[in-house]
Amino acid sequence: MEPANTQKCHNCNHTLHGRTDKKFCNDYCRNTYHNKSKRSENNHIRNTKAILMQNRRILAEMLGDKSSCTAYWAELVAKGFHFDFITQIHSTKQGSVTHFCYEYGYKIINESSISICKMKGDKMPGSPYPNPADIPGKTR
Ligand SMILES: [Zn+2]
């Protein structure tokens, strides 16, 4: 006698019958399960994008039409800024690092202040990471 299948459907949690490697009752449960996991993936992307757009809006509002300005960390936090959500990092050879949210960026001045700036034109900042071709010991 075959061992009883004690697996439960990943979607509806009903006990499965038949083959022991089954994960779903039927196509309906399989599709529903995959759509749900796709939805949670989309939620993550949408939530991240919303935070980045909010950061961008806060920087844009604070900068106005100035080319750069200084602000307090606390001001940005009060407006709902998330310092850890950025789209790019740009660092110069002199060690100055700018964190970007799209075309708006901020640079840390000290423990209470930052400076805000905007990318010039459509030019993307250079990468802080070495060109892969310059890394010694690369695999061939
Ligand atoms: Zn099911």
Image (spheres, rainbow, N blue to C red):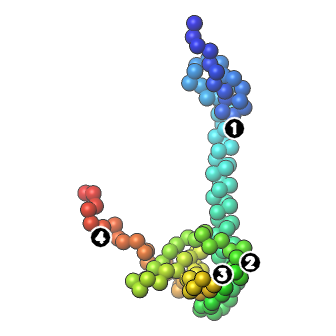
Numbered badge on residue 73: 3
Q: Residues within 10 Å of mark 1 (few under 14, many from 20)?
A: some
User: Could you say whether the residue bearing mark 4 is in a helix, strand or loop?
Assistant: helix
The amino acid on which the numbered mark 3 sits, given as a three-letter code, is Trp
Task: Name the residue carrying label 4.
Answer: 134
The disc, 2 or 1, on the residue closer to the chain's N-terminal end is 1
Mark sitting earlier along the chain (3/4): 3
Q: Which residue is mark 2?
A: 78
Query: What separation in Å lies between label 1 and label 3 (alpha carbons)?
Result: 45 Å
Picture coordinates of residue 12, whole percent (x, y): 72, 32
Which is nearer the eye, 20 or 74?
A: 74
Mark 1 / mark 3, whichever is N-terminal = 1
> Residue at the spot x=68%, y=89% of the render?
64
The alpha-carbon separation of the residues under discs 3 and 4 comes to 37 Å
Residue type, label 2: Ala
What's the residue type where badge 4 is placed? Asp
Q: Which residue is mark 1?
A: 32
Q: Which type of secondary structure does the marked residue at label 3 adopt?
A: helix
Ligand 1 under 8 Å from disc 3 Cβ = no
Quadrant of the image occupied by residue 34: top right
Mark 2 touches mark 3? (CB < 8 Å): no
Q: How many marks?
A: 4
Q: Secondary structure at mark 2?
A: helix
